[in-house]
Amino acid sequence: MEDNNFWVYSRYEDVNRILKDTVFVKENRNAMPPHANEAQQQGTTAESNPMMSMLDNWMLFRDPPTHTRLRGLVSHAFTPRAMEKLKQSIVSIAEQLAERMAEEEEPDLIASFAFPLPVIVIAELLGVPPEDRDLFKAWSNTFARVLDGVDHPPDFAEQSAKAAVEITDYFRTLIAQRKSSPREDMISELIAAKEQGDRLTEQELIATCVLLLVAGHETTVNMIGNTVLTLFNHPEQRMRLLERPDLIPSSIEEALRFESPVQMTSRLASADIELGGQKIRQGQVVQVMLGAANRDPAQFDQPDRFNIERAPNRHLAFASGAHFCLGAPLARLEGEIALTVLMNRFPKLRQADRPLKRTQSVLFRGLDRLYVRTQ
C-alpha cells in the first residue's frame, strides 16, 4: 500500500525487527523532515484538544529521550521485588471476587472477575481511593475507543474531550492531596521524583497516571477472559492443566500467543529502509500485526494449536524493543493468580449456555461478556 503511505507486516521476523529497529519511531516529529513538521504543526491544535494533549504525554507514543525518562520514573514499580510484595494482595483480591462469583447462578466472568481484578490492583498501586474506582470504568472505555482508531459517531470527539478533562481534574486533585500528605503509593513516588530535580511536568505526571490506569487493566481483562474461554474450547488442555497446575505460567504464555490481547501496533519510518523486499520511505506508517506474528509457522510449530506446554514460546504479545510492555510482569502475575484462584475455587467451571459477546475492536481482542457456571 505504498501509494497510501501505509505498510502492513505480519511475519514474526519482520514484526520483531520493526519493533526493535530504532529507524522505526512513534513520533511524527521524529519521522518527518523539519519542513514537513513545520507545515503539519501549523494545522494541528493538540493544546486545544484535551484528549490529544493527554495522549501526547503518554510514554506509549514518545521516543527517547522523553520515553526513556518517563519509563524510568515508573519502572521500579514493576521489578520482581515489587511484584513479590504485591502478590499476596492480588491473591486476596482474586479470592474475594471469586467468593462473590460463587453467589451468582450464572456470573459474567468479565464483569464479576476479569474486569475488577486489574482495576483494583492498579488503583491500589496508584493510590486511588476504593470509593473512586467506579469512576474509571467509563473513562477507561473512552480511552480504549480512542486508541482503537476506528470511525466513531459524530459526538465522540466531544465525549472523549470531556473524559480527558474529567480524569485530568481528578488526578490533579489527587496529586495536590499527595503533595501535602504523601503516602506509600506510586503517585507520591512520582511527585517525589519530580521534586528531586526530574523534569516531569504536572501534565506528564497526570498523563502517566492515566496511561497506567488504562493500560494496567484494559489488556489484562482481555488476557484473563481469553485464557478462560480458550481453555473452555480446548477441554483436553484444560484437563491437563487441572492435573498439572504447575503448567499455569506456561498456559498464560500460550494464551497470550494464541489470543493476543493487543492485536497490532504501529511505527513510522524515520528514514528510507528496505524490509521484506519492499522499500519503506521516510514518514510512511508501518502497521505491525502482533496477533498474526504470534501465529507465524516459521516461528511456532503448529501455530494454530493451543498447547499449554509449548516451549520455547517467544511470543510478541507484549511487543519487544524499547516499547516492550512495562507492565508485563504485573499482567503475568495477575493472569497466573487469576487462573490459579479460578481453578482452585471452581474446578468444574464451564461456559454457560448463553451467548458470549466479543469486544468490537480492531486493536484489542477480548470479551465484553462471558457467562459461566461454577458448579
Image (tube, rainbow, N blue to C red):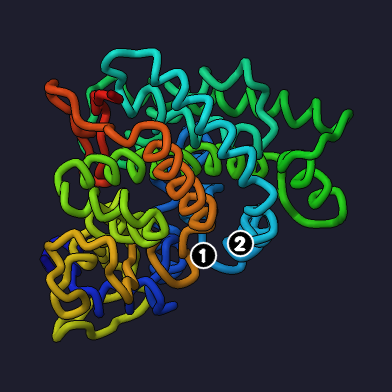
Q: Name the spot of residue 80 as percent of width and height, x first.
A: 63, 61
Q: Based on the displayed image, in which of its 4 quarters is residue 228 positioned?
A: top left
Circle 1 residue: 63
User: What's the residue type where badge 2 is placed?
Assistant: Thr
Q: Dot 1, crowdedness within 10 Å: few (<14), some or many (≥20)?
A: many
Q: Name the spot of residue 303 as percent of width and height, x first.
A: 15, 68
Residue at point 69% right, 59% down?
81
Q: Dot 2, crowdedness within 10 Å: few (<14), some or many (≥20)?
A: some
* 245 with respect to 15 (left or right): right
Quote the CA–CA distance across marks 2 and 1: 6 Å
Above-or-below relation of 365 to 117: below
* 150 with respect to 192 (left or right): left
Number of numbered callouts drawn: 2
Q: Quadrant of the C terminus?
A: top left
Q: Based on the displayed image, in which of its 4 quarters is residue 361 positioned?
A: top left
The answer to whether residue 54 is visible is yes
Residue at point 29% right, 66% down?
309
For mark 1, give the secondary structure.
Answer: loop
Q: Name the spot of residue 36 as percent of width and height, x first.
A: 38, 64
